[in-house]
Image (tube, grey):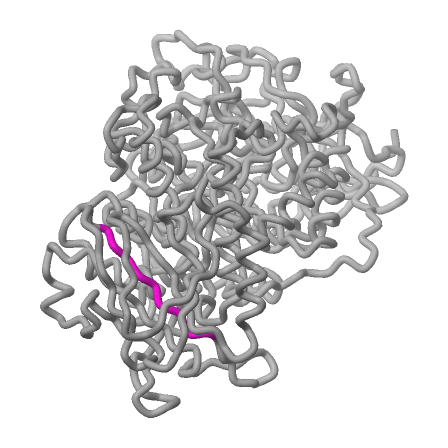
Amino acid sequence: MKIWPGQPYPLGATWDGAGVNFALFSEQAEKVELCLFNMSGKETARIALSEKTDQVFHCYLPDVRPGLLYGYRVYGPYEPKNGLRFNHNKLLIDPYSKAISGDIEWNDALFGYTIGHKDEDLSFDERDSSAFMPKSVVIDSAFSWGNDVPLRTPWNKSIIYEAHVKGLTALNKEIPEEYRGTYAGIATHEMIEYFQSLGITAIELMPVHQFIHDRVLIDKGLRNYWGYNSIGFFSPHAAYASAQSPGKQVEEFKSMVKVLHREGIEVILDVVYNHTAEGNHLGPTLSFRGIDNPSYYKLVSDDPRFYMDYTGCGISPNMGHPRFLQLVMDSLRYWITEMHVDGFRFDLAATLAREFYDVDKLSVFFDLVHQDPLISQAKLIAEPWDLGPGGYQVGNFPVLWAEWNGSYRDTVRRFWRGDTGVAGTMGYRLTGSSDLYEKGGRKPNASINFVTSHDGFTLHDLVSYDTKHNEANKEDNTDGERENYSSNNGAEGKTDNAEILKFREKQKRNLLSTVFLSQGVAMLFAGDELGFSKQGNNNTYCQDNELSWINWDLDNTQTDFLAFCTYLVGIKKDHPMLQRKTFFNGQDSILPKKKDISWLLSNGNEMTEENWNDPKTGTFGLLLNGEANDEEDYHGNKLRDDTLFILINASQQTASFNLPPAFANSTWAVILDTRYPQGMPSQQARNGSTYEMEGKSLCLLMVPRPGKWEKVQAMCATVLPNPHR
């Protein structure tokens, strides 16, 4: 085999049409071998990389082609007490693999030390791990993208749908069986039609970076379903491809993105750079640990045998090392340029701000992101917390970043559950959380508003269970969040009580209506619109089965709720007053005596500070004057909208709302009332009269702009054919 010197850049295996360049960084390695394998997993060649430039070992093989399987063996000191864990007996995955073939077959040979040895990880294991390891794959990156370009849907017009690649379609019988649970399944005509009817603008996929199933789960007969256990930051997870030949997952992922873009739907990836699948000092040696442990991982400063752990996963990245920062930045750019994704949600993002110990908002990582011409223009979403000291950072991320607003989730849950003293905070959450974001120069769109996500109860379970029921995880129900701000509303879990079931459905409508009528970016967890339940399990990370997969066989109640959700999304998208780019000012800035927002009590009086501070306050209204909107569209035209009156009654008692006297000569359309399974068709109520609300309900009234009455009536008649069922 011909072996040429090659180049130190780019890192990874790069096919240039004539041959393949291999480049691997290791600051402290003494020797690196490139191992080549045939399709049956047999090693066919071992090549010493004699060229080294700027701590990068490299070579060029003119005789190899895409589809080749490979891995590395890295030589150096095995001194765990000094943070060095080189073991050339262990085959290592290329950190820059564009595709990875095969799953880990758990075996003691995967560990750099001898399991059961009296010195634990200080011992040195001489067994060859290659037979049990996945292999890196050389790919051909060529793909016919056509005229595909970034959609760049404005934040204020975005509706996010969080979904799991497998769980979304695994049980959907309308999709061809071979495509269920795959990238291809998401791109089928059936799913595209569903997304379009629902009205989402972006799908946020749970981790698709190549991940492994933890040994402890496999031993229990479980699997890492969620995928927060990455080992390949450039490779799409192979098991989500309908075609299982090496490298085909890349093409199928690209095809999915292309189809979604064609239909106006952005793709956002949930990325996990805060830890890897190698775990703590007793974990396996799969890649980074054996290539250059102290460069990739943050070690305890006075005892480098051990790892800092800000995530609860045993290990944290070395965000202070330029090569790990380079890997993260290269990975993000790759998914933008080569895979055409539109944005990222960063799991436990506070960890990425930890250059040293404390969370530093001005860390190098954020500086690099903001200065990068590609990454800075993508949608950037932080899960703004980790498990380390000072790790809860909601509201503290820089400009350009949106955040999963955990405070929004908890406040809305508590408010509708009936907790007292929540009204003041609820006011902030409804209007974009200015208390969290405005002081830092950020806008309402910094707030990703949600009441449920993959982590925790589904919407249906949130109103059906007081406590978690995670026994299926085989951890004695000790895992998962204990405080969920949930309520079973009269019976724990399943029940035949018609009144309890009816009330639960109304509470679900209240919760989702709040999300879609709030300022900020609405996020819907896939399956919630279908009334999907996980039977009270709030931590299904290990349940790769029908407990986690969405059930698409709907009864009448679920069909009603889907119609309601579709209608609700349409309301959000139809009204500029619900999509503001800036915070309300509450002043007469456009028209005399016409404020953009007013807070009203049920008697028609404006709310006072005393009302906000009253722990019993749970009934109020938000008047959004569409004629007083001070925002402009992309072309500089003034945005005008209907006037919206959002009525909220979280108490158990009925409430009689006086309609605002400022609209004495107006006719109101009632376009939403959560007492009804699908909302409510248009009705008229002359100003000066009152609107009667049930206890625990939310309503939306509207003064349509001139010429819009016919559209309102047609919309309600079409979407809500049978509101009284």
Q: Which sits in the foreground, 399 or 389?
A: 399
- Up the image or down, 140 lies above or below 467; here it is below
Please state the horizontal and vertical placement of residue 224, each as a whole percent of the image.
49, 24
- Up the image or down, 150 lies above or below 97; here it is below
Please state the horizontal and vertical placement of residue 153, each as a whole percent of the image.
60, 63
Quarter-of-image position of residue 491: top left
Point 71% across, 30% down: residue: 175
Q: Which residues are magenta?
A: 642-650
Left or right: where does residue 515 sit relative to residue 103?
left
Left or right: where does residue 358 sit relative to residue 338?
left
Q: Can residue 560 be seen from the camera position used here? A: yes
Please state the horizontal and vertical placement of residue 273, each as a whole percent of the image.
49, 43
Please state the horizontal and vertical placement of residue 521, each as a whole percent of the image.
46, 59
- Up the image or down, 447 lies above or below 546; here it is below
Q: Is residue 647 magenta?
A: yes
Q: Can residue 443 be seen from the camera position used here? A: no
Point 78% across, 14% down: residue: 40
Q: Quadrant of the C terminus?
A: top left
Q: Quadrant of the N terminus?
A: top right
- Up the image or down, 310 lies above or below 581; here it is above
Point 51% across, 32% down: residue: 556
Query: Furthest-bottom residue in view?
Result: 592
Q: Is residue 264 magenta?
A: no
